[in-house]
Amino acid sequence: MQFCPNRTSEEVEIMAKEFAIGFYRSRAWQEVREYIYLKQHGICQRCGRPGEIVHHKEYLTPQNIGN
């Protein structure tokens, strides 16, 4: 997972595919997101700037969302 400074949390939720909305609201995701944020000190691995949004290294699909 990676952080990106280019989008807000609200924008990401709006952009989330219908099948993934529950996932992004889950406690499990929130805990993993916080862990990655702290581990990376809030720095985007793509551009090196501070960010808020966590990106998946592999895009979510209906087939892999439970993995």
Image (cartoon, grey):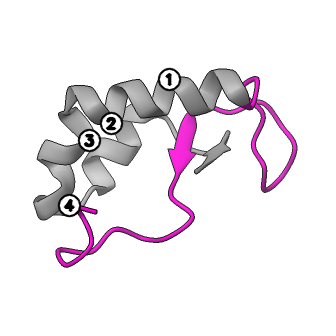
**Dot 4 crowding, Cα within 10 Å, few <14, some 14–19, many 20+:** few
Measure the C-alpha gap from mark 1 to mark 2.
8 Å
Which one is in front in this view, the residue at disc 3 or the one at disc 4? Answer: 4
Which one is in front in this view, the residue at disc 3 or the one at disc 2? Answer: 2
Please tell me which of labels 3 and 2 falls first in the chain.
3
Q: For this view, does 36 lie left or right of residue 44?
A: left
Answer yes or no: do the residues labelled 3 and 2 have beta carbons within 8 Å?
A: yes
Q: Where is residue 50 in the image (x, y as percent from the top left)?
A: 77, 30
Confirm whether the magenta stretch covers residue 61.
Answer: yes
**Dot 1 crowding, Cα within 10 Å, few <14, some 14–19, many 20+:** few
- Looking at the rendered structure, the kind of residue marked 2 is Trp
Confirm whether the magenta stretch covers residue 66.
Answer: yes
Residue 34 circle label: 1
> Which span of residues is magenta-colored?
40-67
Please tell me which of labels 4 and 1 falls first in the chain.
1
Residue 66 circle label: 4
Q: Mainly helix, strand or loop, the magenta region?
A: loop
Please tell me which of labels 3 and 4 falls first in the chain.
3
Q: Which residue in the structure is indicated by mark 3?
A: 24
- Looking at the rendered structure, the kind of residue marked 3 is Tyr
Measure the C-alpha gap from mark 3 to mark 4.
12 Å
Q: Which residue in the structure is indicated by mark 2?
A: 29
Q: Where is residue 62 in the image (x, y as percent from the top left)?
A: 17, 74
- Looking at the rendered structure, the kind of residue marked 1 is Glu
